[in-house]
Each structure stands twice: as structure tokens, then as C-alpha cells.
Amino acid sequence: MPESPHDHELFDIIEREVERQSTTLQLIASENFTSPAVMAATGSALTNKYSEGYPGKRYYGGNHVIDQSEELARNRVKALFGAEHANVQPHSGASANMAVYMGLLQPGDTILGMRLDQGGHLTHGSPVNASGKLYRFVSYGVTPSDERIDFDQVAELAHRERPKMIVAGATAYPRIIDPEPFARIAQEVGALFLFDAAHIAGLIAGGVHPSPVPHADVVTFTTHKTLRGPRGGCILSRAEHADAVDKAVFPGLQGGPLEHVIAAKAVAFFEAAQPAFADYAAAVVRNCQALAEALAGEGFRLVSGGTDNHLLLVDLRSWNSDISGKKARLALDRAGITLNENTVPDDPRPPYITSGLRIGTAAVTTAGMREQEMRTIAGLISRVLGSLGDADEERAVRDEVNALCSKFPPYPA
Ligand code: DSN
């Protein structure tokens, strides 16, 4: 191989990002720290190989080794979730969802999904996303009283609109999503049932949330959130949908699969099958509940009053109606606390401003933090938001964040 000069410019940037991840608090609910083994597979020579097709049926030569890696990933994920069929090629959760729509529906078909401003995902029918442009989405939401999924509304809309598919799953919903009532309603109206488990795949694998696999026609998820794998997507389905799903992924939507990432998914599925992963999943939820309780103690209102999973939503309106989610996120960022602004149910502000914050505990739990640290974090958040824009206080909190993170390095030297 010809020698190339060391690319200081780029590798310095990577080093600075590693430092940022290690010295500030990572509370974005969709992020995590993968293991060194997952990163080693992602950075392996498998990135060099073209392998369009599926194991045993490729369009390029030299895939007898790659076939073993993709087969291992498929078998491991099927065993992990008890699924009949798996496709591990989707590059992301978004492409996994699009493949399901494309494989099982016709453009223009009606789909029932969760409202975006109440926790649903972009690919559940946003008008600016391909899902919303190609299919006719009808949306259900949460009840005004307890801010949990309104199953009466799901049933009513399903019977009225007769969708071809019902989608469960969310990107910002802090409670358990029970797959059973969705499956029952889908059966009543003859709809297919897709469960998008992107956020909670790790909680399902770890046994702390109910599995949608026995109830749903198809389950999609990302591998990099609570499941703690590489950035990517995955589709599990009943055997009867296997062909349609596979054809929609390739050649329908994607070309060459990212075999280095598929190998890393295999590593993540192996890790998630270990007994320690169940302890991790339980700790993520315990941490989130401790954080929720401590934030409530600081006077913050939590959407639905708390959490059953890895994330919580703070409604800032009752704390200080002048503080938008965006303003709060920027102040917290300056203080070394990384999270994102998020709409809350019936938010009067637009989605790029919002009145809420979404906070997740998957990454800090991987780093080893537990309930005591969650209480400290709640106090730090409260200090920054209680003196919004005070640069001295932001600097003081930033120093404390730094000291806290130094005790929990995600990648110890
Ligand atoms: N962007 C992801 C999240 O943060 O929830 C969903 O795609």
C-alpha cells in the first residue's frame, strides 16, 4: 500500500471529539457509547468489500467470508429478539422504516402513526419526509389528562380510516409502549402492525420492556441507541414478510451494504445477549427515574409525570415561560451538559424552538454513573436554567461537569 502522510487535520478533529464526549455530559436520549469491540469492527477491513445482495446470493465475487459475518449478525439478532426473519442491512432507522412501507404497502395507502409533536418520528408521516409525501398518514396522540398514548383515539381512527398499517413507536415518549392493544386494533381492522423500537431496542433486549416481536408483523430499530451498537438500522419480521422486506431494502432502496457496520452490529447483538446487558438496561431505567424525581424536586414539570424508560421530557413552561427549549439547550451546552430541545404535547412553540427538553440516560449509564450522579446532574441543570445566561455560573457548572465526567471516563486509557 502506498504510504500517505499522516492526516493531522482530520485526526486532530477526532481526538477533540473524543475529548468532548469524555469531558461533557452526554444526555441525548438517542446516543450511547459503543464498546471498543464494536468500534474495532466498524473500523475494520470489511469496509473494503462490495457485497450487494444477501448471504449466498451476491452480485460480486469474494463474499464467502463476508457471508459468514452477515449470517452471524442475522442469526444473533433473531435469537436475541426471538424473530423469524432479520434484515441487518438498513443504513439507518429511517431507511428501515421506508423499506417496510415500500415492501408491504403501495404509495397512497393510509398509515396510522403517532403525531410528531407528541413523540412520533419524522418517518411516521412528517410532510417534509418521504413517508408523508408517499403515503397518507393519519395521526393519533396522547391524552391531555395523563399524556400517555390515547388508545381510544387509536381505535376510533383505525375503525374510521381503515389504515393498511398501524405504526407504534416514538422518538420522544417516556412511557412503556404496550404492543398488545396496538396488535388487537390492527387485527380488528385488518391492518399490518409495524413497531418502531428504535429508542427502546436495548430495553427490550435487556428484558425491561415488553417485546413487540410476538405481536407485530414487523419491528424496526436502530442499533446505536439503547442497544449500544454501531450507527445503523435493522428490520425483524414474520417469515411471511421476509421476501418483501429484503427486496425493499435491496435492490429497492439501498445498494452495497455497509459490511463493516453489519459486523459491528453482530458484535453488539453478542454483547446484548450477555447477562450483564440486562443489568445495564435496568440501570438505565433506574437512573432515568432518579433523574426525573430529582428534576421534579427542583420544580420542573415532567411530561406524563415521570418515565418508564431511558428518557424524560421536561416541560419548561411551568418553570419559566420565557425559556424556550432552544435557549435552555444552548445554555446547558455552554455548561457542558449536552441534550436536545423537544416539543412537549400541544407545544405553542415551533419544533426548532420548542418548550421542552429531552434528556436520556443510556450513555451516562454506560459510563458507569448511577442514581447519586443523576441527582447531581439534576442540580447542575437547575443551576444553569435558574440563572440563564449567567456566564460565571455556566463556567462554574462546566468545571463541576468536568470533575464529574473525569470519574466516569467512557473509554479509560
Ligand atoms: N434522531 C433520532 C432521535 O434523536 O430520536 C431519531 O431518529
Image (spheres, helix red, strand yellow):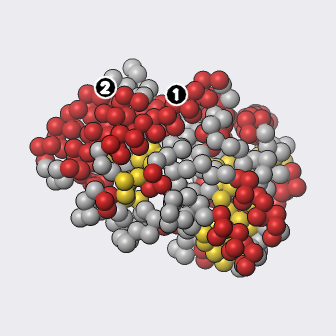
User: Residue at the front extreme?
Assistant: 145
What's the mark number on residue 406? 2
Question: Where, by quadrant of the figure, is residue 139 drawn?
Answer: bottom right
Left or right side of 276 for 245:
right
Q: Name the residue furthest top.
A: 413
* Whole-percent x, y for residue 376 in the image: 30, 33
From this viewpoint, is residue 255 visible?
Answer: no
- Kind of residue indicated by mark 2: Ser
Does the residue at mark 2 contact the one at mark 1 (Cβ under 8 Å)? no
For numbered disc 2, what is the local secondary structure? helix
Question: Can you give x and y, in whole percent of width and height, for residue 155 in the image?
Answer: 71, 69
Q: Judge by depth and name the residue closer to the eye, 141 or 76.
A: 141
Q: Is residue 290 visible?
A: yes
67 sits left or right of 123 in the view = right
* Residue 280 sits in quarter: top right
Checking the image for residue 36, the label placed there is 1
